[in-house]
Amino acid sequence: MSTTITSSLKLASGNKLPVLGFGVWDSPTDLTTKSCLEALKVGYRHIDTAQLYGNEAEVGGAVKQAGIAREQLFITSKIYSPESDAQSTYQKCLDSVKKIDGDNGYIDLFLIHNASVGADKCKTMWQAMEKVHDEGKFKSIGVSNYGIGHLEDLKSYAKVWPPAVNQLELHPWLQQREVVEYCQKNGIVVEAYCPLVRNQKADDPALNEVAKKHGKTTAQVLVRYCIEKGWSPLPKSDNPGRIAQNADVFNFGLGKDDMEKLDARPQEAALVLAVDNKSTS
């Protein structure tokens, strides 16, 4: 697949999602702005945050300080749970816009963080998100940690369908093939959080064999694996060297043999319904 750091995936909304994103889950608030600026410096244009992460304002600080035109940046955030009624949930969505881009700003992509909060709560959040989307303050809306059943339930009431993306934990050991196939058939772009498997598979023999073959790190191979799959990976780091390294994945490709070797990794249980979405590490 011929891609560059400026490549993008087309969303159902018509907007374009940069193929590589930068995650800020668990990034300390005193480092988030600095890390985002480092990421933007080496070419990332997509930053993925969430209300739950507690660092939306710090991401907003990077947006303001970067010296890059707002329309060249793509910012994602997420809502984890609704408020007590529709109006206050709508306001909670607008609060993210204000923190990230000011009163007159917008967010490029806004997601329901996790389907595990329950169907009724998800409906309340989606309908609030649709209202903000109608007003132009969310350019696209989507979901995270949604299985096929959750997506079908959403389809039953959504005015905006399909959701622009479904963000899932994805890597060679957790390929979630059925829901990924469903998304791809229905025009839902797939984003991959935890593409680096929280560094738990750095010693895997097959992964190291592929990395050695290409003269790349295991992390670079894992990011590239997602890109070859057509997913948008969201690697996370607060280390400037690794931030740059994780973006240096566009000067090599993984062949059929490489992909088959990684695809054959034993599959682990999905953490789709985990409360703590350890996104993007």
Image (cartoon, rainbow, N blue to C red):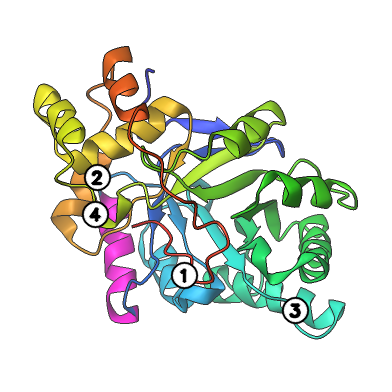
Q: CA distance from mark 3 to mark 2?
A: 36 Å
Q: CA distance from mark 1 to mark 4?
A: 31 Å
Q: Mark 3 vs mark 2: which is more N-terminal? A: 3
Give residue 163's position: percent from left, percent from top.
72, 45
Q: Inspect the image, locate mark 3, and give the three-letter code of the amino acid beneath it.
A: Gln
Q: Nearer the viewer, mark 1 or mark 3?
A: 3
> Which quadrant is the N terminus positioned in?
top left
The span shown in magenta is: 29-41
**What label sits on residue 200 in the rendered view?**
4
Q: Mark 1 vs mark 4: which is more N-terminal? A: 1
Residue occupying the point 18% across, 27% down = 210
- Residue carrying label 3: 91
Q: Is residue 79 left or right of residue 241?
A: right
Residue occupying the point 26% across, 60% down = 237
Asked if marks 1 and 3 touch (Cβ < 8 Å), the reply is no
Q: Main secondary structure of the magenta part?
A: helix
Q: Quadrant of residue 239?
A: bottom left
Asked if marks 1 and 2 touch (Cβ < 8 Å), the reply is no
Identify the element where label 3 is drawn: helix
> Which quadrant is the C terminus positioned in?
bottom left
Identify the element where label 2 is drawn: helix
Q: CA distance from mark 1 to mark 3?
A: 18 Å
Q: Mark 1 vs mark 2: which is more N-terminal? A: 1
- Residue carrying label 1: 60
Q: Quadrant of residue 110?
A: bottom right
Q: Mark 4 vs mark 2: which is more N-terminal? A: 4
How crowded pointer 4 is (Cα within 10 Å; few <14, some 14-19, many 20+) is rated as: few
